[in-house]
Image (tube, helix red, strand yellow):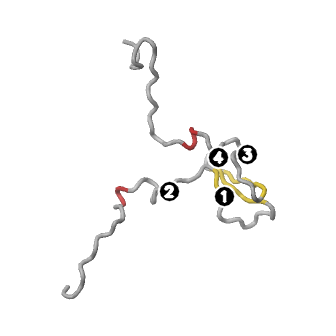
Amino acid sequence: MEGEEPATPTTETPKAERPAGGKGRTRKLIYKLPNQQGVAEGNTKFFCTACMKGFLVDTGGTPQVCPQGHRIDDPELTGTVGTPEPAAKTEEGDGAGPA
């Protein structure tokens, strides 16, 4: 229309080009639940995404392992999904298998 400025293009990434999961945020393996209602004083409730269970920790503490044994630094649980492992090389060949 006359007298109006043209719309300026946005710098936002189109939805189709964004990483899966929306805004590209990653979720921690063990994280503090935002809603602490109903938790006894002196405790903090955390959640493990590996076993899908909540658990309590003394306030001020940050758990490195959930009660089921899932570690926050476990590469199998925190690694990139879909990354192929390189083929193992052998002394006889290049790792491509038997000739």
The reply to whether dot 1 and dot 4 touch (C-beta < 8 Å) is: no
In the picture of the structure, the residue carrying the numbered disc 2 is 25
**Kind of residue at badge 3:** Pro
Q: Label 2: few (<14), some or many (≥20) within 10 Å?
A: few
The residue shown at (73%, 45%) is 67
Q: Is residue 64 above or below residue 2?
A: above
* Secondary-structure class at tag 4: loop
**Kind of residue at badge 4:** Cys
Q: Is residue 10 left or right of residue 78?
A: left
Q: Given this view, does label 3 or label 4 mark the residue nearer the observer? A: 3
Q: Is residue 6 above or below residue 9?
A: below
Between marks 3 and 4, how big is the CA–CA gap?
Answer: 10 Å
Q: Label 3: few (<14), some or many (≥20) within 10 Å?
A: few
**Kind of residue at badge 1:** Lys
**Kind of residue at badge 2:** Arg
x and y percent of residue 42 in the render? 81, 62
Q: Which mark is residue 96?
A: none
Q: Who comes first in sequence, dot 1 or dot 2?
A: 2
Q: Given this view, does label 1 or label 4 mark the residue nearer the observer? A: 1
| The quarter of the displayed image where residue 57 is located | bottom right
The residue shown at (20%, 85%) is 1
The reply to whether dot 3 and dot 4 touch (C-beta < 8 Å) is: no
Q: Given this view, does label 4 or label 2 mark the residue nearer the observer? A: 2
In the picture of the structure, the residue carrying the numbered disc 3 is 67
In the picture of the structure, the residue carrying the numbered disc 4 is 51
Q: Is residue 51 above or below residue 36?
A: above
